[in-house]
Amino acid sequence: KRGRPLTMGSLGRSLLGGGVSDSKLYVVDGCLCCNTSLYLDIPSCLGCSGECELLFLRAECCCKPNTPQLRPCICFDLKQKSNELRARVRQHCFCCVHDCGLPPPKVVACTLAKFGIALYPRVGCFLTLDQLSMNRL
């Protein structure tokens, strides 16, 4: 089962290397529209990448093996975006994946978890995002 693609905006680059299945993201912490997961698929988890949007600015970074650079000789890009009023962060650093947004985007699972123990939408220990994401905000 293929999960939501974690793409780097209009550039079409993937945060985790081609979209990652929610069945490979183990939820560690979750607080409604934000969650932190472990991505344990080696070698796909190697490197760091992310995107951040705040008001009218968008920042992207990518430092992963076998990934094209965002600009010549650097792995960071900053640009102006459309007039959407939102805050959004998607980042990946080795085995940690963080996803958050306000207002809550539909692609962020609504979870409540701490230290790998999930309370919402299902109760369990060290569950994948796929197992938890029955309900989306």
Image: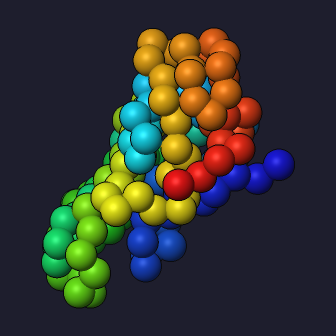
Residue 85 percent coordinates (x, y): 24, 75
- Hey, which quadrant is residue 84 in on the image? bottom left
Q: Which x, y percent locates residue 104?
A: 41, 58
* Relative height, residue 19 to residue 80 (above, below): above
Relative placement, left or right, of 7 versus 83 is right
Residue 107: image location, x then y, percent: 54, 58
Can you say whether 89 is above or below 47 in the image? below
How many marks the image carries: the answer is 0
Q: Residue at x 47, y 46 (%)?
A: 65
Residue 62 visible in image: no
Q: Nearer the viewer, residue 121 or 18?
A: 121
Q: Is residue 5 left or right of residue 59?
A: right
Image point (52%, 15%), residue name: 116
Which x, y percent locates residue 95?
A: 48, 28
Q: Residue at 48% across / 23% down in the picture?
A: 113
Q: Nearer the viewer, residue 76 or 74?
A: 76
Q: Of 112 and 89, which appears nearest the observer?
A: 112
Q: How is the image coloured?
A: rainbow
Q: From the viewer's perspective, is 61 left or right of 117?
A: left
At x 45%, y 13%, the residue is 115
Is residue 115 shown to the viewer in this render? Answer: yes
The single residue placed furthest to the right in the displayed view is 1
Horizontal arrangement in the rendering, residue 89 relative to residue 56 (left or right): right
